[in-house]
Image (cartoon, rainbow, N blue to C red):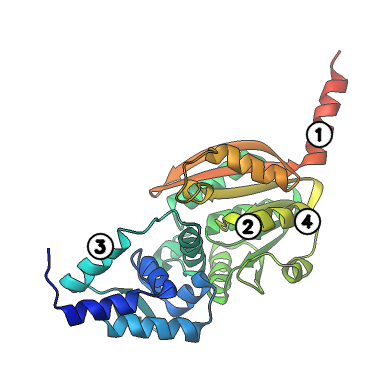
Amino acid sequence: MYSTAPPILVKWLRAAGEPSRLRLLALCADGALSVSDLAQALKQSEPRVSRHLKILCEAGLLVRLRHGHWVHYRLAEGAEGASFVRGLLGQLDRSDPVLVRDRGGARAAAVPEPRAMAHGAQSRLGRALAELVAAGGLSAPLEAVLVCGVSHPELLESAARASRHCTAIAQSRRAAQAARAFAQRRGFTCRVLQATSPDVFSDTDLARAGEPFDAVLLDTFASGEALARMLEHARRVLTPSGRLWIFERYESLERSRERIVEHPLARLRRLLGDAGLTCERLSPVEADGEHVLAAAARPAAAAAGQVASAAGARP
């Protein structure tokens, strides 16, 4: 246990005792991130986030690291400061919806590691998800596929190789650049658009992407109201017989600070149903230390029609 002089402790408390700065500390505890990544995650302007980061750095709670043309921020390595931050963050409910959304936004905005991208495989989780959708029906020949989010380029490649026309919507300029570079290295064609808002899906984005689509892949790890809106948008751009794939972390489907009264699987089925989609398949996926639910769904009308046709065909 470290003993800290009162003036230093007061400086730390003043720096960390502001909602946005506390969220920044929680994000930087997971790894080094740039101002752009952090602004995307918090959905705040870069100048505003920069001011918060300056206060945290001056207090000795964060440090600036230069990587080529980019500056990243991470927790300070000093024993006393690090101990204070870790103790502070240990009191946080990591399943809080705001913190879950922040982590998802940071993952989506961050540029993948160059070494992994050069080998054409970003993660074991990405490969597992790509294999799952291929086995679940994402295979040629499809006319058009929409990929919302480019967190796992393996999914992007699967969608592009299964369709004549593949369109992706990336959450940030950096994510879009990384996706285009990955497609070029891997030798597949996909139109990559940058989202006009942090929510990935918007009416403007959908108009630019065109519609309808035979398949939609939501590679965004959204949660709460954002997830409900995205599912509604996805249903609108699907063809009547199209299929949607969604990937959600268990933690984003759980209630914060409450007794869990709805199992994550049941909650995801309900969210799909509320958006007019019928869940056909739910599969748990575990890789890279992450636990993800992968779901495949169709428009409810199409699913009902299939059931009626099957019943009519029985002798």
Q: Contact (CB < 8 A) between labels 2 and 4?
A: no
Label 1 to label 3: alpha-carbon separation = 53 Å
* Mark 1 burial class by Cα count in 10 Å: few <14, some 14-19, many 20+: few
* Mark 3 burial class by Cα count in 10 Å: few <14, some 14-19, many 20+: few
Q: Which of the 4 quarters of the picture holds residue 92?
A: bottom left
Q: Residue 87 carries which label?
A: 3
Q: Contact (CB < 8 A) between labels 1 and 3?
A: no
Q: In this rendering, is residue 266 above or below 84?
A: above
SS class of the residue under badge 3? helix
**Residue 123, percent across and down?**
44, 54
- Who is closer to the viewer here, 245 or 222? 222
Label 4 to label 1: alpha-carbon separation = 19 Å
Instruction: Please name which of the two marks, 3 or 4, marks the residue nearer to the observer.
Output: 3
Q: Residue 225 carries which label?
A: 2
Amino acid on which disc 4 is placed: Val
Q: Is residue 140 visible?
A: no
Amino acid on which disc 2 is placed: Glu
Q: Can residue 304 be seen in this view?
A: yes
Residue appearing at x 47%, y 63% in the figure: 107
Of callouts 1 and 3, the N-terminal one: 3
Label 1 to label 2: alpha-carbon separation = 27 Å
